[in-house]
Image (spheres, coloured by chain):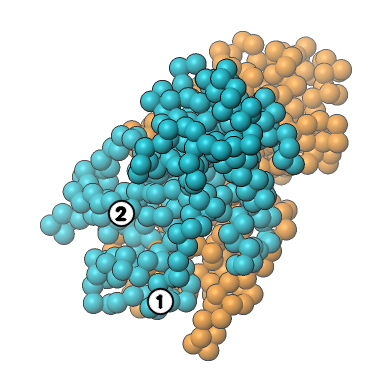
Chain colours: A orange, B cyan
Amino acid sequence: MASWIPIEDGSDFSLQNLPYGVFSTDDLDQRIGVAIGDYVLDLKALAQEKVFAAIDFDSSTLEEPTINAYASLRKRVHQDVRKLLQEILNESTLLGPVLRDYRDRRDRVLVPLSRAKMHMPMHIGDYTDFFVGLYHAQNCCDIFRPGMGLPPNFSSLPVGYHGRASSVVISGTPVHRPRGQIVLNGIPTESLCQKLDFEVEFAAFIGRGNKMGSRIDVNEAEDHIFGVVLMNDWSARDIQQWESTPLGPFNGKNFCTTISPWIVTLEALEPFRTTPLTV
Amino acid sequence: MASWIPIEDGSDFSLQNLPYGVFSTDDLDQRIGVAIGDYVLDLKALAQEKVFAAIDFDSSTLEEPTINAYASLRKRVHQDVRKLLQEILNESTLLGPVLRDYRDRRDRVLVPLSRAKMHMPMHIGDYTDFFVGLYHAQNCCDIFRPGMGLPPNFSSLPVGYHGRASSVVISGTPVHRPRGQIVLNGIPTESLCQKLDFEVEFAAFIGRGNKMGSRIDVNEAEDHIFGVVLMNDWSARDIQQWESTPLGPFNGKNFCTTISPWIVTLEALEPFRTTPLTV
């Protein structure tokens, strides 16, 4: 699947990917875009020019400064928009006049990535971190409860905790080394963190929510995932170790959580679907 | 301190209290009000009529559908607004023409509480629950870690965890009995909660925030507290007990947290300030 836009081999931003982000430039206010090659495609401008008119959805959601409203729509809409974008960006598109052959529009809506300033793609209402990776869990248990093995609930349910939603930031945001209470020579002491750690994690944005008190069937769960990002779960291990009995991680994680600014859709990852690890 | 508005003895809504809430009626869109006797005083209408013009602040914050923007202002503004409201509502006010003697305005801005529908007063970005009450902590430890006593960090720092911000609702909202995984006869089983519990707690709304990476000095902490509410910390004890090692409470608390719709300011509580419990 090749595009008329030049895309370097090995680029993260192929026609198969088309991740969503929120960007601004010196001239353009904060808006939704899709990365392609060395460009970001301005979806606000395309929506305003009625490029999505053939798809049955409220395209004003693409004119908002975050992806939340658009992400809350049915999966079907995201799939139709993706198909249309792949068609108009394809080198052998049947819809050349929409973008490829419409030089004025091309110059306006294809913004060089080098000029784009990235922002948090969605407003995060709640952020949950789950403890599900077997090797990760084994490592953590070796650190925090040596000799005790995995907790008895590990193989029965995904254990999770709420992280601090308001300190999730995008890659590139400076991280402040946290200060907090740690135990030094057996004495609780206020100190800069001495054991700053980081872990790469897989994070999902929930697009469409559910009514409070109602449940989402596990077979429908994927319909509610708008897309995924990589996440850097920064941890102040010394602060965490002292504070986390009995209520779990708190200040040891609160100071910063970093995500990539581009949200990759499940459709883009579909070719890489594999069978789960079995224990 | 008596008001020209009739206030029953023992009313929660005296001239000393003046709590803030967000209400609507069949005719009025969602707006900020202050409770007084059997009425709610419409601050949006008063702000639009420039009643607060003598106070140096952006009074359009009082025209918003939540208290967040107003709460984020300096404590001095809240104190000045409170003084002005106490003056114009006082039976011996020097500012009678502002409200008491201006019948047309009185009828418009004093809305009977019976007609007011209450809403969440503030948008909650993050919600933290701290474990600080000695007797409460002793009770919890007896339930969840019998014989082990208080955790070693208890007397050194306020241990806390993030609750689910999006399931905080106001009093009167129906509570759904949660379903989750509990251990029955030694076997992890999906079930309706069998051990629903509730606890009254003292909760504070942080009004003015801090920049990420900066700290608030403990001596300035009160300047950041807009006010307080009573909170009902609903807990599914059987779900909580099984899930909470090692990451703390999660689904056992997520289904609902109830707060009172009226935010009582620290100024209103000042006469009741007392010395802390010493252990």
Which residue is pictured at 51% across the width and 81% down the height? Answer: A188
Q: Position of residue B79 (x, y in %)?
A: 62, 48
Quadrant position of the C terminus of chain A in the picture: bottom left
Q: Nearer the viewer, residue A144 or B55?
A: B55
Q: Nearer the viewer, residue B187 or B259?
A: B259
Which residue is pictured at 68% across the width and 61% down the height? Answer: B214
Quadrant position of the N terminus of chain A in the picture: top right
Q: In which image quadrant can residue B141 be found?
A: bottom left
The chain that hosts pointer 2 is B
Q: Is residue A101 visible?
A: yes
Kind of element beneath mark 2 = loop
Which residue is pictured at 47% across the width and 32% down the height? Answer: B5
Residue type highlighted by circle 2: Glu
- The circle on residue B110 is none
- The residue wearing badge 2 is B199
- The residue wearing badge 1 is B278
Q: Position of residue B229 (x, y in %)?
A: 44, 48
Whether discs 1 and 2 lie on one chain: the answer is: yes
Discs 1/2, front: 1
Distance between the Cα atoms at labels 1 and 2?
A: 22 Å
Q: In which image quadrant can residue A47 be found?
A: top right
